[in-house]
Amino acid sequence: MGVREIQVAGKALTIHELEDVCDSVTGRGLTGSWVWDSALVLSDWIATQNFDFHEKTVLELGAGAGLPGLTAALLGAGRVVLTDIGPLLPGLIRNVEANGLRDRVEVKEYVWGSDKSPTQSGDLDEFNLVLMSDVFFDTEETAALAKTLKRVCGERKDTVVWAACEVRPWTAECLNGLATQGFGVVELSSQFNPSNTSNSLEEESFDMFAIFQLIPPNQETTLKLPFPLHFCSFP
């Protein structure tokens, strides 16, 4: 653990990883205290997409160290909200300040499934892009995540939801849970061509990861993308 300098779109982001943030019940270190490989994958991927970040509002759920959300700010997003559980917020704030992004990046406590807004103004449904990395790990949390995503997208027809994860035995079960909640699940891995493999990942290891776009129930008939859709199906 320590300070990492991560290259994104030709620029450097400073990320502080912590080793002394523990769960108050179990005493174990909170895994959101450091940068997971899927966050590196998502950060690198969004930097290569034809997405106009200018003046866009971005929400990162389960932000951990905040790399993808900070990347969105670096790429020009007008407002970014990084959310996670309370013990991880000081680390997020530190990373925002380390990169001089306090004018555009906010840090808020938020628990999936909550009826409260992660923003003081209550504008939870005003985001253009939602980012998540390595959040498909607990099938019991899927319903709460689905509830939050539905609130985030609200009645908008243009909210984009991108998620990256390391493919594990339970990944399909988590995605299937979202599908049963009405979400379309589109794997975008075929569009993924990592431009920067120097951030601790070997090129071959990218085969272990997948990037998904989650299509909210109210968007499935209206979504337009510049590439063919390949909806995933699960047993």
Image (tube, rainbow, N blue to C red):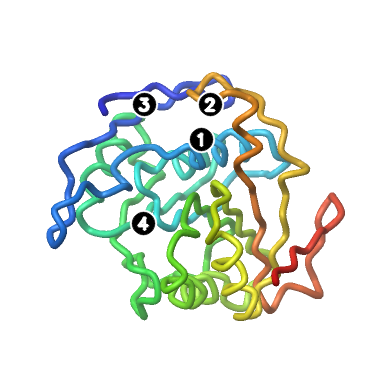
Which sits earlier in the primary sequence, circle 1 or circle 3?
3
Kindly identify the amino acid type of the residue bearing the numbered disc 2.
Answer: Leu
Kindly identify the amino acid type of the residue bearing the numbered disc 4.
Answer: Thr
Q: Which residue is mark 3?
A: 14
Q: Secondary structure at mark 4?
A: strand
Q: Which residue is mark 1?
A: 40
For the residues labelled 1 and 3, the Cα–Cα distance comes to: 13 Å
The answer to whether 218 appears left or right of 120 in the picture is: right
For the residues labelled 3 and 4, the Cα–Cα distance comes to: 18 Å
Which sits earlier in the primary sequence, circle 2 or circle 1?
1
Q: Residues within 10 Å of mark 4 (few under 14, many from 20)?
A: many
For the residues labelled 2 and 3, the Cα–Cα distance comes to: 17 Å
Q: Position of residue 74 (x, y in %)?
A: 50, 34
- What is the count of numbered marks? 4
Kindly identify the amino acid type of the residue bearing the numbered disc 1.
Answer: Leu
Q: For the C terminus, give its image quadrant.
A: bottom right
Q: Position of residue 184 (x, y in %)?
A: 70, 70
For the residues labelled 4 and 2, the Cα–Cα distance comes to: 25 Å
Looking at the rendered image, the disc whose residue lies closer to the viewer, 2 or 1, is: 2
Q: Which residue is mark 2?
A: 201
The answer to whether 118 appears left or right of 155 in the picture is: left
Q: Residues within 10 Å of mark 3 (few under 14, many from 20)?
A: some
Q: Position of residue 139 (x, y in %)?
A: 47, 70
Q: Which residue is mark 4?
A: 83
Q: Position of residue 199 (x, y in %)?
A: 50, 23
Q: For the N terminus, give its image quadrant.
A: top left
The residue drawn where x is 45% and y is 59% is 137
